[in-house]
Image (cartoon, rainbow, N blue to C red):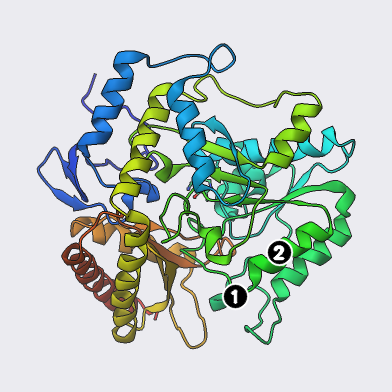
């Protein structure tokens, strides 16, 4: 056997560095290279690497018991975690269904929404509407709701629905309008879609409160979610907030939807829930939904072997305690403002930056061939990939967020370091991004792309 890596990687032809260890915001590979984890992996490692008390919580739980099966036993860490999440979550999202990934969390949300209406005798309500420029996961149900053209492409024949409405992306409005004169045309579009499809056929509407992987931290215009909530109420449609990327303090509030004071009926969590120390995700459900199902068939038709895994639950609980004790939700807001100021300073210097946006420590940078005319780079120019690659060579990890706009164009990346990052480390990130973008900008000019 040759010595090549046997792990199937995103790009089969390219080798990836093997990480030997991590500490704080830094990762180290076997060659001794150091990387700043400027995106917390996939916006996941939100308290940084190697935190002693999380490791201790994992070991302690392993000494007690690592696995029990969800239909035979419950377990104390899962119970404690569900209680803690009910305190954290807005309103009456008092119930947690634990799964292992964000895709499972959104797909479970979809199933619970459909089941809720079945229990109420309205089984025709079985579609979940969603938006373009969105990502809700890679499994078929979750992908079916996702408005991410590149990720759907190969599987379209298996996906049972298409997103129905445009994303609230004011910088590059898909409806070609301008806020506020648009009067929230994207919300009006949702109402029209509901009327056309028929509310009697619709179980829910799912949205990422701030669009992550497919858009690059796109924040909707003021009033958007309040108007969405009103429409959902008017047509008896459940509102599902996909907080897999934005939840657990990442945006400077416990959950991004809290920025607008809007109450979802179901919420999907993942990523930062365990800060990457173990796989766990959750679907949070309101009292009303659980009571309806409890009074009906009394069983939710979803679940996985590893659901509510005690070891993962103990880790997630320790992560929440760590967030609380170190005041990291508030820290995310303060540090996020600082990071955004830094990125905005770069925007003044570097014409390749079209837009800087985001909340807390979920910041996005959109790259444009021409900001004035909103001319994007062609996808085949792979500008985002070049930026991400060059940043890595310079010791900084950032997260690509491209291809969501319309599948043929759109370049953006996320800067989302651990919430524990220090100010001088943020300065370093900004410095490296400046270097990288300057270099890529020069190459783009040379290649006639700008
Ligand atoms: N929803 C959102 C908003 C996400 O960002 C992601 C992951 N990028 C998912 C769902 C899917 O999560 P996972 O990769 O853990 O399945």
Q: Residue at x 37, y 38 (%)?
A: 12
Q: Residue at x 63, y 38 (%)?
A: 107
Query: Residue 20: percent from the left, percent from the top?
Result: 17, 35
Q: Earlier in the sequence, mark 2 or mark 1?
A: 1
- Give the numbered dot on residue 261: none
Judged from this view, the residue extending furthest toward the top is 72
Left or right of residue 205, residue 268 in this image: left
Query: Residue 235: percent from the left, percent from the top?
Result: 84, 57
Picture quarter with the C terminus: bottom left
Callout 2: SS:
helix
146 above or below 224?
Answer: above
Residue 299 position by quadrant? top right
Q: Is residue 275 visible?
A: no
Q: Residue at x 21, y 67 (%)?
A: 432
Query: Residue 207: percent from the left, percent from the top?
Result: 62, 55
Cα gap from disc 2 to disc 1, whole angstroms = 12 Å
Q: Residue at x 71, y 61 (%)?
A: 229
Query: Residue 261: percent from the left, percent from the top?
Result: 59, 63
Left or right of residue 173, residue 127 in this image: right
Judging by the rendered image, the residue that carries numbered circle 1 is 222
Judging by the rendered image, the residue that carries numbered circle 2 is 228
Q: Is residue 297 visible?
A: yes
């Amino acid at each position: 056997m040759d010595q090549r890596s046997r792990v199937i990687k995103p790009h089969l032809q390219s080798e990836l560095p093997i990480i030997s260890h991590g500490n704080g915001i830094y990762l180290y590979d076997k060659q001794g290279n150091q990387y700043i984890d400027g995106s917390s992996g996939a916006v996941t490692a939100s308290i940084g690497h190697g935190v002693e008390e999380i490791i201790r919580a994992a070991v302690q739980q392993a000494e007690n018991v690592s696995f029990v099966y969800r239909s035979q036993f419950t377990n104390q860490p899962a119970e404690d975690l569900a209680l803690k999440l009910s305190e954290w979550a807005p309103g009456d999202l008092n119930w947690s269904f634990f799964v292992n990934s964000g895709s499972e969390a959104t797909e479970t949300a979809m199933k619970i929404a459909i089941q809720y209406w079945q229990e109420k005798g309205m089984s025709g309500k079985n579609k979940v509407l969603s938006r373009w420029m969105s990502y809700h996961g890679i499994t078929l149900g979750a992908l079916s709701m996702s408005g991410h053209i590149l990720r759907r492409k190969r599987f379209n024949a298996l996906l049972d629905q298409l997103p129905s409405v445009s994303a609230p992306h004011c910088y590059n409005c898909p409806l070609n309008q301008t806020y506020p004169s648009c009067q929230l045309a994207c919300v009006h579009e949702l109402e029209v879609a509901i009327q056309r499809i028929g509310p009697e056929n619709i179980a829910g509407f799912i949205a990422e409160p701030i669009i992550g992987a497919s858009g690059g931290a796109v924040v909707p215009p003021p009033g958007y979610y309040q108007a969405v909530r009103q429409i959902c109420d008017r047509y008896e449609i459940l509102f599902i907030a996909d907080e897999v990327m934005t939840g657990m303090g990442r945006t400077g509030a416990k959950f991004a939807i809290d920025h607008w004071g809007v109450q979802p009926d179901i919420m999907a969590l993942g990523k930062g829930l365990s800060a990457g120390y173990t796989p766990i995700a959750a679907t949070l459900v309101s009292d009303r939904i659980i009571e309806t199902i409890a009074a009906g068939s009394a069983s939710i038709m979803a679940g996985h072997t590893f659901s509510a895994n005690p070891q993962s639950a103990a880790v997630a609980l320790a992560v929440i305690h760590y967030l609380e004790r170190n005041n990291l939700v508030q820290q995310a807001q303060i540090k996020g403002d600082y990071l955004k100021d830094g990125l905005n300073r770069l925007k003044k210097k570097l014409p390749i930056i079209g837009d800087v946006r985001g909340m807390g420590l979920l910041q996005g940078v959109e790259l444009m061939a021409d900001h004035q005319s909103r001319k994007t780079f062609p996808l085949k120019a792979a500008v985002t990939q070049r930026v991400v690659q060059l940043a890595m060579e310079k010791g900084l990890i950032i997260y690509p967020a491209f291809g969501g706009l319309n599948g043929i164009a759109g370049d953006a990346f996320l800067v989302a370091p651990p919430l524990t990052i220090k100010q001088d480390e943020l300065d370093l990130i900004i410095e490296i991004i400046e270097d990288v973008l300057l270099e890529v900008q020069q190459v783009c000019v040379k290649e006639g792309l700008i």
